[in-house]
Structure formats: C-alpha cells, structure tokens
Amino acid sequence: MPNRLALLLPLAFLLASCGSFGPATVAHDRLAYARVTADSAKQQALLNVVRLRYGDHISFFRVGQVVSGYTLMGEGRIGADIFMPNWQLDDDLSLGALLHYEDRPTITYDPMTGVELARSMLNPFPPGELFLMLAAGYPADLVLGIMARSVEGLPNGLAGDVPADGAARFDELVALIARAQAAGLIGAKRESGEQGQVVLLLREDESSAKDVITRLQALLGLTAGVSAPRIVYGTGPGAPNEIVVQTRSMMEVLATLGSRILVPESDVAAGRTPDTAVDPAGVAPVAQVRIHSSNLPLRNAFASVSYAGHWFWIDEEDYPSKRAFSFLLLLLALVERAGDQQQAPLLTIPTG
C-alpha cells in the first residue's frame, strides 16, 4: 500500500497545479519583455543609422501591444478492473496523467509610413523645445550637441568640415550652458499659452557665476539690458532680443551620426558609402556616437547589427557613445509619440 500512495501523490499534485498561475508570470515576463523591447529598439535605431550611411531606405516599426496567453491543463486517470476473478491491486490498478502547457503571446506592430513618417522624421525640431529641455535639466552637450546645427551662427562640429574656431566657440557655449544649469541660472518658458513663443531666462544675481552669464550673453549676441530673448529658428546671428538656433530633423540627426561610422575602407573604395566625417582641425564634437565595423560580431557590444556583410556595433565600454545613443533613443520615442495618431495596428503576428 505505501507504494500505491507514492504513485497517487504525484497525481494529486498534478491536479492541484491546475489552479491560477497567471500572477506568478508577471515578475518574469514583464522584465523579459522590457529587456527584449529595449534591445530591439537599440538594434532598430542602429540599423537605420547604418542604412542611411549607405544611402539605403529606413524603416521604423513600433511595438504596439504584447498580449500573452497562457494555457495549463492537467488530467489524471485512475482505473481498476473489478470484474476479473481473483482481483488483486497489484495487477489491475492503472494510473494516468497528462499535463499540457501553452504560452502563445501575440505582438502587434505599428509601421511608420507615409505622412506620419515624413512629419516625424523630416521636420526640424522646434528650437524653443531645445531650451525647454535645457531648463528641465537635460544635458546641454546632448541636447545641443546632437539636435542643433548652429546657435547664433556658431557651428556644431558634429557635422564635419566645420571651421575650427567656430566649433571651439560652440563647445564653449555648451560648456557655459552646462555650468549655468548646474548653478540654476538658466531657464525657459512659453509666453501666452502652450503655443506661445519660448523665451530664455538668465539669472544674474549670483556674483560667483557672473562671469559665466556675461560670457554666455556675449556668445549668444545678447546686449546688456535685454531680458527674456526669444528663441527662433534660423541661421546666423539674430537680433539683439533673439537667439537664432538652426535645429536638425530626426532624419538629419541619424544621418549626421551615421556620417561618422568607421566603415570598411573597401566599401568606401567601391563607392558604396562616402568617406567618414572628420573632426574640424582636431576639435572633437561635444557629443557623438562611435560606431565600429568588423567582419565578425563583437561579443561584448552595447548594440550590434548586421548589414551588407558586415557587423556594426557600439562598444559596451564606450560610455560617452552609450550615453549619446541612449539619448537618441529618447528622441526617437518622443518623435514617435508626437506623430502617433493611435491608429489600429496594421500588422499582428502570433509568435507561439
């Protein structure tokens, strides 16, 4: 009889396991999907940067929804033939068990196409939004170093082929804005509502940072006594009460970062892609993403993709590049949300 109980206990456990198990999957699945979605976003962004470098078309798919469906069924059987003569438990008792488990997630994707893609990727960033981001504490080297082509005629060295003196003054401007941010001396606001003009606010009551504000006003072309200058889009120096900023579109951001990919020399020689952009007379840009290429994938890469027979990757140990690339992902997320019309997903794939 003890042997029979040993056979019955697993069967009882199997039947008991058919209760609710959904809550137990939340901790594991939520983190797993978050990790995979983040890695996929990095690969998609990197691939589009590489494709633009090679003159190829870009494509963006947003993960619209993930629905996980679980099924767990257990079945047990106990049978005995009581009509046989000389019935004995050893001969006629039968046990059976069946356990069936299914995990069938359904993932929906929203492709960015047509007008939405053009509006999201080709329109320049509103210059006022850059200074609102600075006022909110976003790093100046990333906001201006990636999203601005020039400020008051000072060119961003990230574009390449930029005069060294102009790039150096742009770097100085970014450094001064970062110091002003740290001291709480810089701000921005909208005038008259959500669609109003953005103006810059500079505090001058800090004697210890007076030299920072004075030099910052000089680089921005602000005359003494001018308060709350307007942030406007354009090129070159502006009026005394304006700060002229030439911003990039998202497409230009991707192309600019792609221009600095260290592509194989054979691809340049074959005319598949242009030469890599170089720093202006040794003045390094305030922000850039170093993307390498090789014939084999890097084992320890922050992000890597395969394209045209080569692997392109960002080194896990290159913190400045990882930081700038993560900011790029944030920009892409903001652009996607701005162009999102909450349309029904066009592509649904059961992955189970």
Image (cartoon, grey):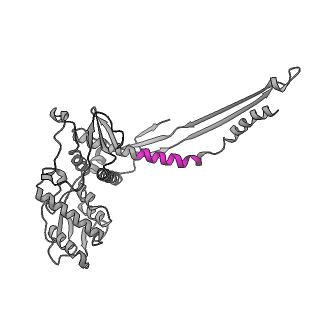
Judged left or right of residue 92, residue 30 is left
28 falls in the magenta region: yes
Residue at image position (81%, 23%) is 91
Q: Which residues are magenta?
A: 24-37
Residue with the most extreme front position: 317
In this picture, is 344 found above or below 224? above
Secondary structure predominantly adopted by residues drawn in magenta: helix
230 falls in the magenta region: no
Q: Is residue 233 visible?
A: no
Judged left or right of residue 170, residue 140 is right
The quadrant of the image that shows the N terminus is top right
Q: Position of residue 216 (x, y in %)?
A: 19, 69
Residue at image position (67%, 41%) is 17
Residue at image position (29%, 61%) is 139
Residue at image position (24%, 77%) is 208
Quadrant of the image occupied by residue 201: bottom left
Judged left or right of residue 267, residue 32 is right
Q: Position of residue 258 (x, y in %)?
A: 23, 45
